[in-house]
Image (cartoon, rainbow, N blue to C red):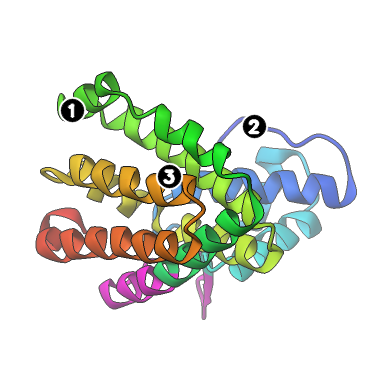
Amino acid sequence: MKRFKTSAAGGGQTQLASLVAELRRQISEHKISPGAKLNEQQIANDFGVSRARAREVIGALEVHGLVERHPNRGAVVRRLELHEMYEIYDVREVLEGLAVRRAVENENPETWKKFLDNLTPEFESRIAAGDIELYEVEFNRFRKAVIAAADNPVITGMLDSVQDQTQIIMRRVLVLPGRAERGLVNLKRLLEAMSKGQAEEAEKLRRIGIRAAIDDLKRYERFVL
């Protein structure tokens, strides 16, 4: 396991949450690779905590679906199979569609109009020129606002886990030919519906957007996975 310098402050559940969040980040960004072994003593040394605390962290990562235990190997970072990736995307399609519908029902339409106004011709030009990071930052900001506005802890928890497991693949899909431009078109249509308070239409459009990303993944899967 690659050593890291981040340390967790505080005690009890706050410390545990900090440790879990840091390792989740490193796993979802592939700084700790699929198949890597998670060693309790190494985690304890890196973070300056007890082995008991490190064991709790690994248990929490297992609950999030990021770690699995193997006989004679212990805890290792889970490596998703292709069929599992598509299954997770199917779940994400339903959950994010529902989150969008709830967000429209709960939030003032003006909130979504502000996001729509950010998609200026200059923004579109930068995306067309290949500024994928700009699109990712803006979309993630929108996605966080949707989840917050949906105000449903069950949806939030499930999407949190799904995001961890698919983040790297989502980034790889985003750089596929034309993917960001198509994503931007879908996002604009979605925000137009949300800014008009059209909850059911927004849910449908969000699901269409995710399905389009899945189709692109299937088309280019041998280059992405």
Identity of the residue drawn at 58% across and 48% down:
23
N-terminal label among 1 and 2: 2
Q: What type is the residue that disc 1 sits on?
A: Gly
Residue 78 located within the stretch drawn in magenta: yes
**What residue is rendered at 47% in x and 50% in y?**
194
- The amino acid on which the numbered mark 3 sits, given as a three-letter code, is Glu
Where is residue 118 drawn, in percent x and y? 41, 27
Label 1 neighbour load within 10 Å: few <14, some 14-19, many 20+ = some
Residue at label 2? Answer: 6
Circle 2: residue type: Thr
Residue at the farthest top position = 122
Residue 170 located within the stretch drawn in magenta: no
Provide the residue designation for mark 1. 130
In the rendered image, which residue does mark 3 sit on?
A: 29
In the image, is 22 to the left or to the right of 94? right
Range shown magenta: 68-91
Label 1 element class: loop
Label 3: which secondary element:
loop
The answer for how far apart the CA atoms under marks 1 and 2 are is 33 Å
- Residue 78 seen by the camera: no
The residue at the point 69 percent across, 57 percent down is 151
